[in-house]
Image (tube, rainbow, N blue to C red):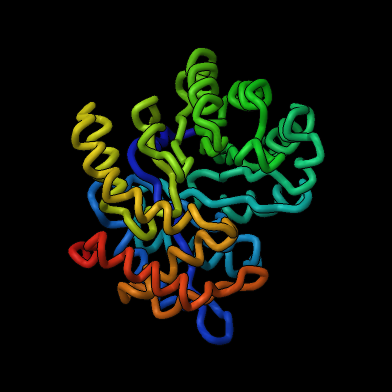
């Protein structure tokens, strides 16, 4: 297995759709130019929640992989999400990923896991072991909010991190105390496993606590700011981190703060449409467009953050 570094910022790309809900590839090309090229973007993550991966056909997932690989080349690691509803589906997606240019597969918890399996290592360990048996790619674990019922307990995460090819945890537990506990426990047992900060409400707090990198869908919208935050964290420059966070905070509150949270990635696309990066913010159902009032407030917040300076 080749060494893959996920230090720095990993951008989880959103995906634009046209009026027929087909993928708008021209907009996707513009998005890749905007969010994967800033200095500090060290990896790209596709087919995840930000990219509405659960709505994509197998052919679409493969095409997203191929086009992204062609754009970013071989220097940046390319991660792809496995959003599956059965173990057989997850294994098949992993095989397709391996055949079509992915460097890492990111294992999402299945909806069934929310019925108690997230605290029982048998279930997710069986899933991950079957994926590891089927492909040679390394694996990252997609840790979700524990409050949702899908986030794994610390003992389950530790068991997963004992697998040789589990190289990272996207840490979105949604609790700052649990984040630090998971970070300390995993680093004590498996120091080479990368902890990727991904609690969108409080990335600043995660950066001060410690992380090996950032993985965020918000990097589709504010890649430059997140790269600046990461650089300041590496330099241990708390003053700079606070200054950058002051710019990020209103945007994060606009995207993630108001219910319903299901709209978060659509709100990012509204900002990107306002900036002219993508042609349309329309999502695929079951996601729905945001209201006109929300779109207006996102546009105002985008202008106040002076994001046009990065275009």
Task: Say if 27 sits above or below 263 in the image.
Answer: below
User: Measuring 76% from the left and 53% from the top, which residue is drawn there?
Assistant: 85
Question: Residue 237, percent across and down?
Answer: 20, 30
The image position of residue 239, as x and y in percent, is: 19, 33
Quadrant including the C terminus: bottom left
Residue 310 falls in image quadrant: bottom left
Where residue 221 sits: x, y (%)?
Answer: 36, 60
- Name the residue: 66% across, 32% down: 152
Instruction: Say whether residue 136 is visible.
Output: no
Kindly identify the residue that appears in the image at 31 percent across and 72 percent down. Answer: 275
Which picture quadrant has residue 262? bottom right
**Could you tell me if residue 275 is visible in this image?**
yes
Position of 209 with respect to 264 (left or right) is: left
Q: Is residue 79 above or below residue 121?
A: below
Extreme-top residue of the structure = 188
Is 154 on the left or on the right of 183, as rendered? right
Q: Residue at x 38, y 26 (%)?
A: 210
């Amino acid at each position: 297995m080749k060494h893959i570094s996920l230090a720095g910022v990993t951008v989880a790309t959103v995906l634009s759709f046209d009026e027929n809900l087909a993928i708008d590839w021209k907009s996707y090309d513009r998005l890749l130019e905007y969010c994967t090229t800033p200095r500090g973007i060290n990896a790209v993550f596709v087919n995840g929640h930000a990219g509405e991966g659960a709505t994509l056909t197998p052919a679409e997932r493969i095409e997203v992989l191929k086009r992204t690989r062609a754009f970013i080349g071989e220097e940046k690691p390319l991660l792809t999400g496995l959003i599956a509803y059965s173990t057989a589906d997850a294994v098949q997606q992993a095989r397709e990923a391996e055949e079509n240019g992915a460097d890492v597969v990111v294992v999402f918890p299945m909806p069934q896991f929310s019925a108690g399996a997230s605290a029982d290592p048998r279930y997710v360990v069986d899933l991950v072991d079957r994926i590891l048996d089927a492909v040679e790619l390394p694996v990252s674990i997609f840790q979700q909010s524990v409050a949702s019922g899908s986030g794994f307990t610390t003992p389950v995460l530790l068991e997963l991190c004992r697998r040789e090819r589990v190289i990272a945890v996207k840490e979105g537990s949604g609790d700052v105390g649990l984040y630090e506990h998971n970070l300390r426990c995993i680093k004590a047992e498996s120091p080479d496993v990368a902890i990727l900060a991904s609690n969108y409400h409080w990335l600043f707090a995660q950066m001060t606590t410690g992380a090996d990198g950032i993985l965020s869908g918000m990097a589709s919208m504010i890649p430059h700011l997140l790269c600046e935050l990461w650089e300041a964290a590496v330099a241990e420059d708390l003053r700079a981190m606070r200054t950058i966070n002051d710019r990020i905070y209103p945007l994060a509150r606009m995207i993630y703060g108001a219910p319903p949270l299901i709209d978060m990635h659509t709100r990012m696309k509204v900002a990107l449409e306002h900036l002219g990066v993508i042609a349309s913010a329309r999502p695929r159902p079951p996601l729905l467009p945001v209201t006109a009032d929300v779109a207006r407030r996102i546009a105002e917040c985008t202008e106040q953050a002076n994001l046009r300076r990065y275009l």
